[in-house]
Amino acid sequence: MGFPTASAEVPDSTAPPFGALLAHIAAAGLVAGALSGTWSLLITERAIEPALAIEEARSATGGGDAEEMFSRTTQVLGGLLGAVLAGLVLSLVVAVVFAGIRHRLPARTDFGRMVLLGAIGFVVLGLLPALKIPANPPAVGEPGTVGTRTAIYGAVLASGVVVALLVSASVSVLRSRGVGIPMTTIAAVMVGAVLVALILVLFPHSPDTIPADVPAAVVWDFRLASLGQLAVMWATLGLVGGALVERLTRRSAPAAG
């Protein structure tokens, strides 16, 4: 009797029902959104306050914008609710992706697969755009450049997804040809690094410049806080989602067997 090989048949036979998988990852998404919103309240808001003070000073001298439509309290609560909803929506997308590529993720357990998928999501959808067109606090940026910034951001996101697909395809080709895991990993890292470098070099930078009255520390504190909020979202989704899916898989295993 031969030993089972790394094919799609074994993972498919142990895959939990999609409905239960979706529910468990959605629960992880709510936790991820809540923690991300908490980070926003405790960390990101503190990084925004100096930028808001600069805007208020500009308004006092007649160089600022008109009165805001919503109060700061409403904006903060809206941001918290938005983080929770974002975590839920993101978790639904992750659940669909996980169900489709579960058998291709190079990990022995569903916990490892979810953690890996969360790490990939953070790099592609969080870190890469932050490197190319980082977030700016309220005191930085002009209304006339919103369209350009949005276009660059969307193009970088789309390119990051393409990079992930190309790296995945490279791994599949190498594994199908019997290449070992160490060499496959090295090749995948090299392919991904080259493609990411091309994105960073070829895509245009943000059209905004930092005004003279905005200290660099204010800008970078906000950028790091924003990136940290994304890291909390993806890390929680990967870790909590992985733990929940792993438990679900173990419960479903006897029924599948």
Image (cartoon, rainbow, N blue to C red):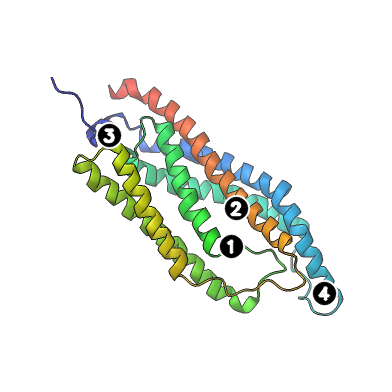
Q: Are marks 4 and 2 in contact (CB under 8 Å)?
A: no
Residue designated by label 2: 227
Alpha carbon distance from label 3 to label 1: 40 Å
Q: Is residue 87 above or below residue 7?
A: below
Rendered view: 17 above or below 91: above
Q: Quadrant of residue 109?
A: top left
Query: Local crowd at mark 4 within 10 Å, few (<14), some, or many (≥20)?
Result: some
Q: Which numbered disc flags the more N-terminal residue, 1 or 4?
A: 4
Image mark for residue 19: none
Number of residues whose C-alpha sits closer than 10 Å to that of mark 2, classed few (under 14), some (14–19) or many (20 or more):
many
Measured in 3D between alpha carbons, the distance from the residue under mark 4 to the one under mark 2, in whole angstroms, is: 29 Å
Mark 3 neighbour class, 10 Å CA radius: few under 14, some 14 to 19, many 20 or more:
few
Q: Amino acid at mark 1?
A: Pro
Mark 3: secondary structure: helix
- CB-based contact (under 8 Å), mark 2 and mark 1: yes
Q: Is residue 203 shown left or right of residue 102?
A: right
Looking at numbered disc 3 in the image, what kind of residue is underneath it?
A: Asp
Q: Which residue is mark 4?
A: 59
Circle 1 crowding by C-alpha within 10 Å: few under 14, some 14–19, many from 20: many
Label located before the other in sequence (3 or 4): 3
In the rendering, at what x and y percent does residue 230 appear? 57, 50
| Circles 3 and 4 in contact, beta carbons < 8 Å | no
Q: Quadrant of residue 31?
A: top right
Query: In the depicted view, which residue is nearer to us: 250 or 233?
Result: 233
Give the CA distance from mark 2 to mark 1.
9 Å
Observer-side mark, 1 or 4, equals: 1
The quarter of the rendered structure image containing the C terminus is: top left
Image mark for residue 12 = 3
Which amino acid does the dot numbered 2 rest on? Answer: Leu
Q: Which callout, 4 or 2, points at the residue further toward the start of the chain? A: 4
Q: Position of residue 225 (x, y in %)?
A: 66, 52
